Amino acid sequence: MEKFNKLNGHAIPLPIMNVDTDMIIPKQFLKTIKRTGLGQFLFFELRYDQNDKEISSFALNQDQYKGASILIAGKNFGCGSSREHAPWSISDYGIKCIIAPSYADIFYNNCFKNGILPIILDEKIVTKLQEASENTLNFSIDLEKQTISFVENNEQKEISFDIDAAKKNCLLEGLDDIALTLNKVSAINDFEDGQEKHTPWLYGNKI
């Protein structure tokens, strides 16, 4: 997993509440177990009509948001089923950070496991950022300092955010669950050696 420290990029406003994982990545695209290739189906039923033509009013189809790496969403983002394809599709599209008032717990934790920074802010602040994203081309996110910076009306603005220290460290170091476990290999081996001495039958050894 790539390390996450600073991110500079455009932001996509998505002022919709209760966006569930089926809206993020519809069920017909869940046949793969690969993390790549899903970005093209992100928000598929919001991006395209029944004839698979782009819906011009949807933000992801508008030129000013092409290549954006930040998504500013409504509260309870990622609710519904626990499909991990949801953060996979978001990451594959190129979005590395989501800002919202609240998230579904499973989706929120899955973001960290896939290198995505989910930021929680007050709903009024999120609304302000959504409005700013319509005119501001660039946002700067500093995970180490826990700040979001942008220019509004020729004035530099900065907003602070909170994040769990352990989750922050995992993103900064690029550690997913497997990498975290591998960091503890020495301690795991010591435990198993001690356990084998006291309970050899667990390891197929004769007493």
Image (cartoon, rainbow, N blue to C red):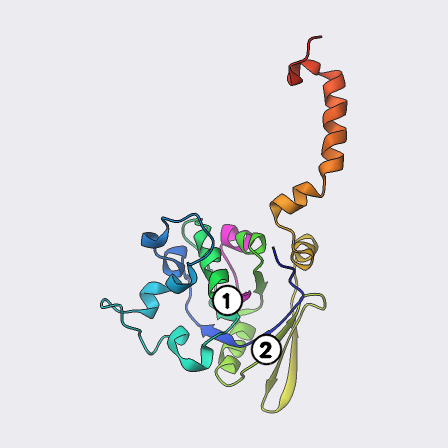
The spot of residue 140 in percent (x, y) is 62, 75
Q: Is residue 60 left or right of residue 72?
A: left
| In the image, farthest residue toward the bottom | 154
The spot of residue 125 in percent (x, y) is 56, 74
Q: Are marks 2 and 1 in contact (CB under 8 Å)?
A: no
Q: Nearer the viewer, residue 128 or 20?
A: 20
User: Disc 1 marks which residue?
Assistant: 94
Could you tell me which residue is drawn at 54 percent across and 56 percent down?
111
Q: Is residue 53 magenta?
A: no
Could you tell me which residue is drawn at 65 percent across and 55 percent down?
174
Q: Measured along the vertical axis of the image, is residue 201 above or below residue 39? A: above
Q: Nearer the viewer, residue 137 or 31?
A: 31
Q: Is residue 96 left or right of residue 173?
A: left
Label 2 element class: strand
The label on residue 105 is none
Which quadrant, please, contains the C terminus?
Answer: top right
What segment is highlighted magenta in the picture?
Answer: 94-109
Could you tell me which residue is drawn at 68 percent across and 67 percent down?
146
The spot of residue 91 in percent (x, y) is 50, 61
How far apart marks 2 and 1 lie (CA) works out to: 15 Å
Q: Measured along the vertical axis of the image, is residue 5 above or below residue 108? A: below
Disc 1 marks a residue whose amino acid type is Gly
Q: Is residue 53 left or right of residue 123?
A: left
Q: Is residue 103 magenta?
A: yes
Q: Measured along the vertical axis of the image, is residue 191 above or below residue 113? A: above
Q: Measured along the vertical axis of the image, is residue 74 above or below residue 28? A: below
Could you tell me which residue is drawn at 35 percent across and 54 percent down?
29
User: Disc 2 marks which residue?
Assistant: 139
